[in-house]
Amino acid sequence: MRQSLTNILDYFYPPFRRFMPVQTFRYAACGGGNTILGLSMYFIGYHFIFQKTLVVIGSFAFKPHMAALFLSGAITFIIGFILNKFIVFTGSNIASRIQLFRYFLSFSLNLILNYSMLKLLIEWMSWAPFISQLFTTIILIIISYLTQKKFTFKVK
């Protein structure tokens, strides 16, 4: 399956060859797919699962936009790690458990930044939740690529 997905991505690479290396293209394709999945899960979570109401889990209460963020984050964490490890950054020789731990650290940083930016944009600046998540995602894509390449999946 890994080779099949790589072959599909590489089939679409030639028009982009002049603009970016194959690793960047694969990251953009895999990350783009994972981002669309995450935004879709955010939208579905916010509008249909949590139905725009306060979510209470034990002694914690989450606003619906934050519950949707955590739902989409749980799904995209798993998919993102698998795609990055086996499709994008295949040259990394760091042990898988170290990669997973580093990916978790990077993902956690992005989640904190995402949470903070949503809080600012939605609660203080009164932006729409989905537009806020879309804007935040664009900024975090850049940060994520750099941390994955230079930290999580770097080559020793």
Image: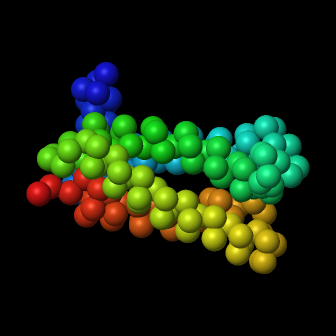
Report if residue 87 is visible in the image. Answer: yes
Image location of residue 130, percent across then percent down: 72, 56
Identify the residue at image location x=82%, y=48%.
Answer: 56
Q: Nearer the viewer, residue 102 or 87?
A: 102
Which quadrant of the view contains residue 26?
A: top left
Residue 35 image position (x, y, % from top left): 52, 48
Q: Is residue 108 left or right of residue 151?
A: right
- Looking at the image, the residue that sits furthest to the bottom is 124
Residue found 15% across the figure and 55% down from its top: 155
Is 99 placed left or right of 57 in the picture?
left
Left or right: where does residue 6 sit relative to residue 52? Answer: left
Query: Can residue 88 be seen at all in this image of the molecule?
Result: no
- Quadrant assignment for the C terminus: bottom left
Residue at x-position 36% and y-position 60%: 145
- Quarter assignment of residue 117: bottom right
Q: In this view of the protein, which residue sits in the foreground, 150 or 9?
A: 150
Which one is nearer the viewer's eye here, 97 or 22? 97
Whole-percent x, y for residue 2 in the image: 29, 27
In which image quadrant can residue 148 be found? bottom left
69 shown above or below 140: above
- Can you say which quadrant of the picture contains the N terminus? top left
Query: In the shown orientation, is residue 120 left or right of residue 35?
Result: right
Q: Residue lying furthest left in this view?
A: 156
